[in-house]
Amino acid sequence: MAAEPSAQGTTPELESRLSGPVRIVGVGLLGTSIGLGLRARGIEVVLADASPTVVSISSDLGAGRPAASGDRPQLIVVAVPPDVTAEIVARELADFPDAIVTDVASVKLQILQTLRERGADISRYIGSHPMAGRERGGPLSGRADLFVGRPWVVAAHDAISYKRASAIDDLILDLGATLVEMSPEEHDRGVALISHVPQVVSSLLARRLVDAPSAAVNLAGQGVRDVTRLAASDAELWVQILGANAAPVREILAAYREDLDRFIEALGDVDAPGARRRVAEEIAGGNTGVARLPGKHGIDKRFATMIVMVDDKPGQLARLFNEIGEIGVNLEDVRLEHSPGVQVGLAEISIVPEAVERLTTELVARGWRIAG
Amino acid sequence: MAAEPSAQGTTPELESRLSGPVRIVGVGLLGTSIGLGLRARGIEVVLADASPTVVSISSDLGAGRPAASGDRPQLIVVAVPPDVTAEIVARELADFPDAIVTDVASVKLQILQTLRERGADISRYIGSHPMAGRERGGPLSGRADLFVGRPWVVAAHDAISYKRASAIDDLILDLGATLVEMSPEEHDRGVALISHVPQVVSSLLARRLVDAPSAAVNLAGQGVRDVTRLAASDAELWVQILGANAAPVREILAAYREDLDRFIEALGDVDAPGARRRVAEEIAGGNTGVARLPGKHGIDKRFATMIVMVDDKPGQLARLFNEIGEIGVNLEDVRLEHSPGVQVGLAEISIVPEAVERLTTELVARGWRIAG
């Protein structure tokens, strides 16, 4: 797989400052993707993992060469499960006394505290967390561009010098990610809110489906599917993440429960004075909250959407996108919606608002039916 | 807009039994879509709405003609907001003593009870609920095919004869929907679970974002966007729906809160005996629950997904779909993912599993990069 140039047009910063390889410990999805991204920039990478099989897969994919005893890494990335991250970081700091070490675990404060307690040399450690991932894990899902355009948090602390920490900044920028500096506490509260609590909320809702009558489950539409999609996540990994970030997650869940209690109370007597107003306020509060989310899959107002009806057979979607290309309009996003067995699908396409009128006219002239 | 033939290949059942028009009261999204669907089958439709403007828009769209005083409808569909549905149904039953009346409100028991209490002639009324909708309301969003392949619940009760109720069955089948018979109680419990409670859970989570630091909100990825998408729903409508279905929603929310309480308690001391196991069980329970959901956007195991890297410029996606068409593989679903400003997008395509190997080989031979 060829790598893409960084979205930010950076030249490899890291290469110029390194006299030894980057060592990656743990070569699942994240470790392999980091290796692929660095190799694409010509940086020497050595790979280590508790599983030799995983190292050889990742190496075969082009993420680097297997680590050898004579390696003198200057930068080490620990990409192992959260539960063992502190231990492996401590070991790496001890084994390679000249190297700067980072990790990519999704919780940051507990790792730093554990390293402090163990007396590890944290003047060479700075934690980080790329906000990237895929539904499938493992080295085979690795991609050189996994981090392009994604936030990558650096969890700053006072014990490491600016000069040393900037090696991690260079690594992040080289991989095309957007550098975000936060304290470990800020990071952990942030991911509790936008990742860990949504996981819990989604899982607990999906649990309600376990014993539900099939007749009810069969009425499910897109709404409940969206809310419960995260509930398919790996339970073992989430026990580790939630265990390592229990306090901030608990705090937000407690506030959520207060809202829920008020909601349940209001539903207890909807004709009581103020009850309907309270329900309305909670739903309206949700409107306000969701509008704060960035990104195109939420309610991105930068793009307009159009729905085009497409016959459900080979070549039809091709013809549509072909003609949109001929018309010269760029698709920002596309989502196909149809029910199994039904002969017509709906392609919901996102484009810049300026292009809507022209594209509508041109598509209709070419015989397409615009459904909305 | 031309109508699609019904997915179930039915011929118009309704037309053969009607000697008068179908009257639609309330011509927003659902009323207009029903009108469009019936008109496409050659059935005479007359439209009524509190707003003459809305009637003229819907009529101009082809959903039927404005109702006139001499109309003798045999079938009446009431498609008004939940809060006024019972009142309008009662009025229609009184005004048209020969007509069968249905409504399409999303809660069923309260309407039937109100009609009983008012002494309305429920031997000519049977409620129904199409599980279809769109994010945008209003007649302009109406579509003749809105109901194709979607479940449409008929809320059966004992006071109407089979013969009379079957007119509604014919209406539903003519519109291409899948007929589902349930009691009003079963329906209301079902939609509480798969529609109303997910709405509440999503809104309450989104509320947590209102006062969150921007730095945290900016870390948001697809997960939280999915869980909170419903939170953008109309507050006024939801107050009506939740108010009309308070008891079943409250019951499920109470069970949800019990799980939440246990979860919060387990997070209070994650090192206590059994705490991690309890967290794991809740997440694993979510795995089991979400696996029960039907449909392709959940975790539909009938289709395999492939991720293809696509340059973000006009014509590239067209070329991809064109070539997939040439290869002769049908796309079951497609989702494009890319970050703004980044030059490479990822097209996640769903196809039948048998086609994966061949499509991969052919696409790679044509120079595409498969990312997973």
Image: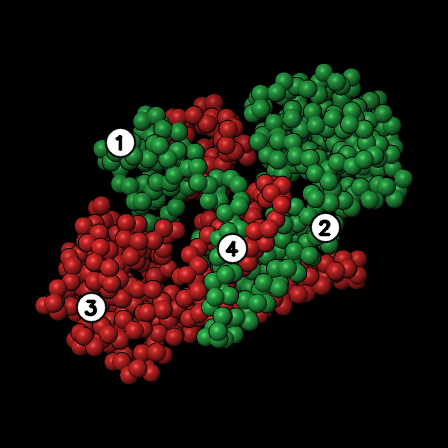
Chain colours: A green, B red
Query: Residue at left 52%, top 74%?
Result: A268
Q: From mark 1 to mark 4, how far is it between C-alphas?
A: 38 Å
Query: Residue at left 53%, top 41%?
Result: A294
Q: Mark 4 belongs to which subunit?
A: A
Q: Mark 1 packing: few (<14 Cα in 10 Å), some, or many (20+)?
A: some
- The residue that mark 1 highlights is A362
Question: Can you tell which quarter of the image residue B183 is in?
Answer: bottom left
- The residue that mark 3 highlights is B75
Q: Mark 4 packing: few (<14 Cα in 10 Å), some, or many (20+)?
A: many
Query: Residue at left 47%, top 62%?
Result: A280
Q: From mark 1 to mark 3, how far is it between C-alphas?
A: 40 Å
Closer to the observer: label 4 or label 3?
Answer: 4
Closer to the observer: label 1 or label 4?
Answer: 4
Q: Mark 2 belongs to which subunit?
A: A
Q: Earlier in the sequence, mark 1 or mark 4?
A: 4
- The residue that mark 4 highlights is A286
> Disc 1 marks which amino acid?
Glu
Q: From mark 3 to mark 2, how far is it between C-alphas?
A: 59 Å
Give B226 or A91, whichever is nearer the viewer: B226
- The residue that mark 2 highlights is A245
> Disc 3 marks which amino acid?
Leu
Give B85 or B249, whichever is nearer the viewer: B85
Query: Residue at left 39%, top 68%?
Result: B107
Give B127 or A220, whichever is nearer the viewer: B127
Question: Can you tell which quarter of the image residue A159 is in?
Answer: top right
> Disc 2 marks which amino acid?
Asn
Q: Mark 3 packing: few (<14 Cα in 10 Å), some, or many (20+)?
A: many
Secondary structure of the residue carrying tag 3 is strand
